[in-house]
Every structure is written in C-alpha cells, then in structure tokens.
Image (cartoon, rainbow, N blue to C red):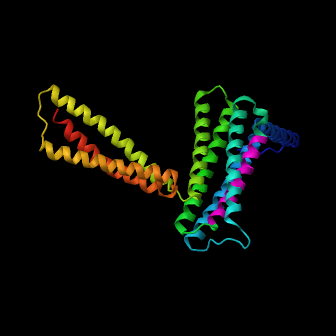
Amino acid sequence: LKKINDAQQKENLTDSSDRVQNALQQLIRACNKVEEIGGGKEIKESLEELEGMLADIDSTIIACDSGFLNSLPGQSFNQSFQALNMTIKETKASCGRLEGFAKKDISQVGSACIDFRMNVSQLVENSKVVASLTRGKQNQKAILQSSKALLSNCGDVFGSTKKVVFDSSNPEYIEELERATEAINQGLLNLMNATRGINTQEIDNAVSNIQSLIEGQQAEYSYYNYTKLNGTEVKLNDFSKDFGELKQNISRIGGINSQIVSAAMINPKNLGNSAKLVSQNLPTFNASINNILGYF
C-alpha cells in the first residue's frame, strides 16, 4: 500500500479523524444522559456500592468464623436491636417507594434509589453491631448470612427497577420487580428472625419437605384409584396393626403441633426445631394413612 504523501490529503485525513472523535464523544455524552433518565446513574452507583457492602460483610463473616467478632465498648444490645428494627422498617418502606416510582413516576426513581441504598447500608451496619453483641458463633453467623442474602436481593431490585424504567409496559419486567421486592420483604423478616435466634432455614426446609410430601400424597391417591379401577390388589398387612400405628402417629403429630403453638407464643427460638420435627414425622404419618386407605 502506498503512503499518503500529499500534505493536503494528510490534513484532510487528520481533520476527518478529529471530527469522528468529536462525534463519538458527543454520542457517549448523549448515551450517558439517556442512562441518567429514571435514576440510571443512581442505580449504577448503588450496584457498585453493593459490591463494597458484600465484600465488607464477607470480611465480617470470616472474622466471626475466626472468633474475632467483638463488640465495641459502650454498645448495648437492646439499643442496637431497636435501631436495627427501625432500620428494617425504613428499608422496607423505601423499597416499596422505589417500586412504586419505577412503575408510575420515573422522575423520582433517582432520589428513591439513593434513599433505599442508604437505608440498606445502615441496615448492614446495624446488623453487624447486633451480631457482635449476640452470644454464640452460630447465632452471630445466622445474622450476618441473612444480611448478605439481603444484599443480593437488593441487587435484583436495582436491576429490575432499571428494566421497568426503560419499559414500564412490559409485564415480565413488572413481575420481575415485584418478585424482587417481595424477596426484600422476606429477607428483612429472615434477618429479624435471625436476631431473635429463630432458625429460618430449618423452617424453610420443613415447609419444602411438607410440600414435597403433599405432592407425593396426591400421587399415592392416584395410585390407589388406578389399582382399584383395574382390579389390581393392593398388598395389605394386618388392619389392627396398621390402624394402631395410625393412631400413634396421629397422637405424635398432635403433640408436635402443640409444641409449634407453644414455641410461636412463648419461645420462638424453638420454632425451627419444632418445624423440623413435623417434617421428619409426617412421612411416617403419611405412610400410615396410605396403609389404611388400601383396605377400602
């Protein structure tokens, strides 16, 4: 290829290149302005700040695992707990406002985004203080893990808010934002439960196990109906023995049910264990019912 030796051509090429660069810079500035519409700038900054919060909570969890999560002199559990409870309420309210503005008034999304972010930041700090004042490494870690999960949910809120702002008529985006907001509400409840020593994970696992059992029970009913319709005999044991086992299991489930009510009203810390007992005993109870159904 030949080089450009003509001075005028070189000048024209340089001028053209400069004009292209200027046009590109103007396009970038225009894109940035468009991004700022509906709180785009604030959402971006919030997502960046969330990364810092996550790194900080991870460091605190490591300190907890190592036994170095200590409270500062003069800190009171009751005062810190009340401050956390207040921040939880403010965080829930600010998240609701952000969702509402994203749907109906995008001009307010930026300020609502900042408000939500600041509440979340304060929430994390308060939860760290409460964790440091809580006895037991397991209880401390439950609080910190709940805070970390909540931060992840906040990222979903900011991301789905951005989608709704740019296309508020898209039902999938609206539904995504509503799910993210609901996850925040559930996460706040989990955090509060963790500060009270309630094992939310055990309760969630119990609910999941019970739901699976219900689905299995429906399959069992289908099986019995199928065998009866086709004249197939269901293998039966001794009716008196099976009926006695059913009565024992009914009594056992009734006792556990009373434990759950007592825990909910008197000692919520035992709710997780009580829920776990229900999920562990329901399969036997379910099997007893199926055994009796086979006789009819």
Quadrant for the N terminus, please. Answer: top right
Which quadrant holds residue 179?
A: top right
Which quadrant holds residue 124?
A: bottom right
The structure residue drawn at horizontal position 61% and vertical position 74%, both measured from the top left corner, is 68
Magenta-drawn segment: 111-131
- Left or right of 119? Residue 16 is right
Can the viewer see residue 43 in this picture? Answer: yes
Tell me: residue 75, above or below residue 87.
below
- Left or right of 65? Residue 77 is right
The structure residue drawn at horizontal position 61% and vertical position 49%, both measured from the top left corner, is 188
- Could you tell me residue 197's position as x and y percent? 54, 59
- Could you tell me residue 143's position as x and y percent? 58, 59
Q: Is residue 115 magenta?
A: yes
- Left or right of 87? Residue 29 is right
Can the viewer see residue 2 in this picture? Answer: no
> Which residue occupies the foreground of this view, 171 or 226?
226
Quadrant for the C terminus, please. Answer: top left
Tell me: residue 233, above or below residue 190.
above
The structure residue drawn at horizontal position 15% and vertical position 47%, both measured from the top left corner, is 241
- Could you tell me residue 205's position as x and y percent? 43, 50
- Could you tell me residue 221's position as x and y percent? 26, 33
Secondary structure character of the magenta stretch overall: helix
Q: Does the magenta stretch include residue 49?
A: no
